[in-house]
Amino acid sequence: MSRLAIGLCLLVIALFAASLLIGPAGTGPGESLAALFAGDGGPLTLVMREIRLPRAILALMIGASLGLAGAAMQGYLRNPLAEPGLIGVSGSAALGAVLSLQTGLAAAFALALPLSALLGALIGMGLVMALAGPRGGSLTLILAGIAVSALAAALTSLVLNLSPNPFAANEIVFWMMGSLADRSFTHVLLALPLMALGALLLALVGRGLDALTLGEDAAGAMGIDMRRLRLTIVTGTACVVGAGTAVAGAIGFVGLVVPHVLRPLVGARPSRLLWASALGGAAMLLAADIAVRVILPARDLKLGVVTALVGAPLFLHLILKLRTERI
Amino acid sequence: MPHRAGPCILAFPRASDRRRGSGRRSGAARLACAALAALAALGALTPAALADAPDRVVSMNLCTDQLAMLIADDGQLHSVSHVALDPRASAMADEAARHRINHGRAEEVYLMQPDLVLTSTLSARHTTAMLRRLGIPVITLAPANSLEDVHDRILEMGAALGREDRARAIAAAFDEDLARLRATATTRPSAVLYYANGYTLGDQTLAGQILLAAGFSNAASAAGYETGMRMPLEVLAMTAPDTVVTSRRYPGASRAEDIMDHPVVQALRHSSTAAAIADHDWLCGTPHVLRAIESLVRTRRALQGDGS
């Protein structure tokens, strides 16, 4: 276990450093780090502190959130296909964020942006949970997710198309695919409070999820309050996904891929999968954000493109596996 | 103003045949039109050849709207485009409100029965082609990419409207004011035109020429970023221009425009007490560009700490 923890931490640190050192300014690593820490007030300091550092921090935070949310949802629903992006939570959060931006609420009160995204995520998640039922099978869960995703995406497009701003309609793809380009510390500060709250809530569910692997009755007998567990997971997931989506758009598949890859390495224990997936999610999003900058440096390739290219084949693989197991 | 026999048909005999059936056109006018059609077909339409000035003109493009409003005689300009009403884009929104408004659609413009339609060469080609098929003369003006173009467009508009004298007077005043404003500064502070999504403009554009005329050098061009290219924020920061000219935001929010409020752009703008914003004066090749140059000169003087 500790070997895995150390390995993942080193991976995250290495990718964080790489994220800080890669960019169109094309400066040497030594020079860049000196400018970051010493801060001579020159242009490179501006680049390192105001452009690359917030971007790397956001990738770390949002990746960790998505990994954590994926692991918690899969543990609770006991379904490897549960993931905030796939079941429409991210899409609903994006709808909430877009509504607060276009109505001017976000301009009037800064925290309105993440709070609206949280509300959107809560509604989306509530809908999916209600449609799929507490022990819904994979099929109902995915179908409910598709319905909620499609509705949220359609409403997001509608709101952006109705906007008086001529640029807004072009940003549909940002809200659907996600990007960290040109973000600043303003966005870090916007996302941080809710994300910290959500991560704290999700960190507390480990014991409950471990007990749940024995079945709901056994978990109940061990003193786990199922309703409280569900409420904690729904709230925690909505907080982290809402805060992340509000500043970076909906980024899919991280919560699907990371727990799947790490599950065998933690002996399939949900409590250990939680922190491992947080680290793994951070690593995956940092890597994806480096990839979009290396593949197309001059353009804003969306993060969701890279995560979907990795995640969709795995998703298909999981479906095939479930089919052979359950039919 | 003498009344015209009817709209002249430029090189579109099908429509002309249709009109002939209406019997409104005299033989002489038909001949004159045939001659005009031949001229237009050669691309050599000198509007001085128009015996009569048009008296029911519809303009469908923001830039031709403004030029026409400046040059046209009272009552000559019938309608301008709805964009001309928008104070964010139009330098003459109040003036535009005194005209009928069109939305650039062939159907509504045709029903206005204009004897001349003015638009930009960049406007919807299907619309202008349809109007021409319907027998309405259309004159297109190329967008201005330099301050010399502004002078030329004023004269072209004057010719199109049969108001050459007025156009010559406006062009002469424009040249005179421009010569007075044009900076003779020896040290040119650097500036970058930075718009939504990080797009920049180079020297070969009207905005680029405004920048140069006001005594700035274009740091984006110097860094190899030309018109229509995206300049990454990092490159903007490393270029460290003396000031950054951004554009005015539209209502409603967009992530594309957020880039102009990024701390990097703000840091590059803070040193300037009068950081410039490219507004409606920058968009079209009209004498209003002089106001843009004037305010940019003030920005430069503030940057240089005196009146140089």
Image: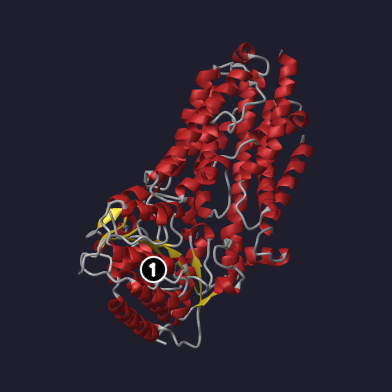
Residue at 75%, 17% (x, y): give it: A324
Which residue type carries mark 1? Ala
Letter of the chain that mark 1 sits on in the rendering: B
Residue A98 falls left or right of residue A16:
left
Figure quadrant of the C terminus of chain A: top right
How crowded is the residue under tag 1: few (<14 C-alpha within 10 Å), some, or many (20+)? some
Do we see residue A42 in this rendering?
no
Do we see residue A85 in this rendering?
yes
Residue A54 falls left or right of residue B11:
right
Residue at 67%, 46% (x, y): give it: A288
Residue A92 falls left or right of residue B55:
right
Q: Residue furthest front?
A: B27
Q: Which of A218 and B27 is in front in this view?
A: B27
Q: Which of A208 and B31 is in front in this view?
A: B31
Relative to B167, residue A268 above or below:
above
Rendered location of residue B141, percent (x, y): 41, 66
Q: Nearer the viewer, residue B174 or A177?
A: B174
Secondary structure beneath label 1 = helix
Name the residue that disc number 1 marks.
B35
Rendered location of residue A13, percent (x, y): 71, 50
Q: Which residue lies furthest to the right in this view?
A: A3
Figure quadrant of the N terminus of chain A: top right
Q: Which of A314 and A84 is in front in this view?
A: A314
Rendered location of residue B264, percent (x, y): 52, 63
Rendered location of residue B197, percent (x, y): 52, 57
User: Which of the 4 image quarters holds residue A77?
Assistant: top right
